[in-house]
Image (tube, rainbow, N blue to C red):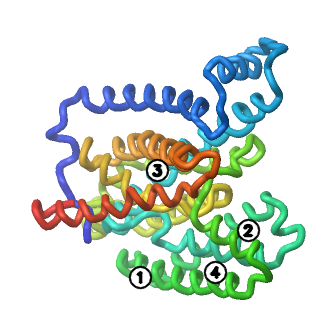
Amino acid sequence: MVVNRTKNNSDRPAWLMPTLVISLVGMVMISIVMGIFLGSADLDAKTVIDVLRYKIFGTDNPDLKRSAISIVWELRLPRVLLAIAAGGGLAVAGAAMQAVTQNVMADPYILGASSGASAAVAFTFVIGGVFAQSSSVISIFAFLGAIFALLLVYSVGMVGSAGSTSRLVLAGMAISVILTAATQFFVSVAPDAYTVRNITAWTMGSLASARWTTIGFPSIGAILGSLIFIYFGRTFNLLSQGDETATSLGLNVKSIKRLTIIVTAFITGAVVSVGGVIGFIGFIIPHIVRIIIGSDHRRTFPLSFLIGGLFLMWMDVLARTVIAPKELPVGIFTAFCGGPFFIWLLYRKNRYGKM
């Protein structure tokens, strides 16, 4: 399935883009505040505000409890910020992958990143000892696993020429099957039920491990990678027209595809290293953005980042509040949205001839 090649924003009013950006930035700021207020712990608005005043402005409050400071500043705020950066990064990477592969089903995980990270993490838990007890070591293994998988897919799918997009996708599917089998093998040889639960929980995706000490690398990785894609927005407009057309216009297709794979690997590896496997964001959000604003990647990329960040943040809020105090994996909620959205896309394709 090929990305619909419609006119870039010619039928959209000039005021739509700045209005959307201003509105979305405002919604992000409001959502950050709401994300800090909402949670399983019963904290009133005054307590939350007092904590923020204490940490930001140094305003002391003798009635402020250490537990409240820990919940608001050390747990909720880092988690909200990571959700926005990770969701935005995955959405932009998904839009880039759909342009490169010219396939509306493409997302950052279609090329095996999640399978590689899952296999590496499962291996880490099976090894046990200090490896399984250190979140930093698990994050490093997850990042290296995702990078390894994506580079392996690239070496198989792009060898010999500028590379066939269908071959790249097929290579991703094949490598994913192999790495998923490796994960299942590690689950089968796990020494105890606790290890199996850890592996399963990680593969479902969660932002529960977000702390000030852990969100720096994934956040910077997602933002930096997104900025690279935004910078090359005009190039992706040419690439989405097809390899032959882009080449005839002077574009080095192979170099752009290589750059896309490397940056996507970096974004995805950075995100999964802390958040685990969180699917469908890179699939859902670019479609929504193209329906709203058109297919110009100079606009699609920044809007995808903002909407993707909002989407994951609110999915995470649901994950930690629906059955509080117990927390659900955020990947469950993104999948609940992704499945029906895919069905709607099929309906739209059958009825209107486009996605």
The crowding category of the residue bearing disc 4, from other C-alpha atoms within 10 Å (few below 14, some 14 to 19, many at least 20), is many
Disc 4: which residue: 183
Image depth: mark 3 or mark 1 in front: 1
Badge 2 amino acid: Phe
Q: Earlier in the sequence, mark 3 or mark 1?
A: 1
Image depth: mark 1 or mark 2 in front: 2
Badge 4 amino acid: Thr
Q: Quadrant of the C terminus?
A: bottom left
Disc 2: which residue: 141
The crowding category of the residue bearing disc 3, from other C-alpha atoms within 10 Å (few below 14, some 14 to 19, many at least 20), is many
Task: Note whether 206 is above or below 20 in the view shown.
Answer: below
Q: Secondary structure at mark 4?
A: helix
Q: Are marks 2 and 3 in contact (CB under 8 Å)?
A: no
Instruction: Measuring from the top left, give residue 336's x and y in whole percent.
Output: 41, 59
Instruction: Measuring from the top left, give residue 45's x and y in whole percent.
Output: 61, 21
For marks 3 and 1, give the CA distance: 24 Å
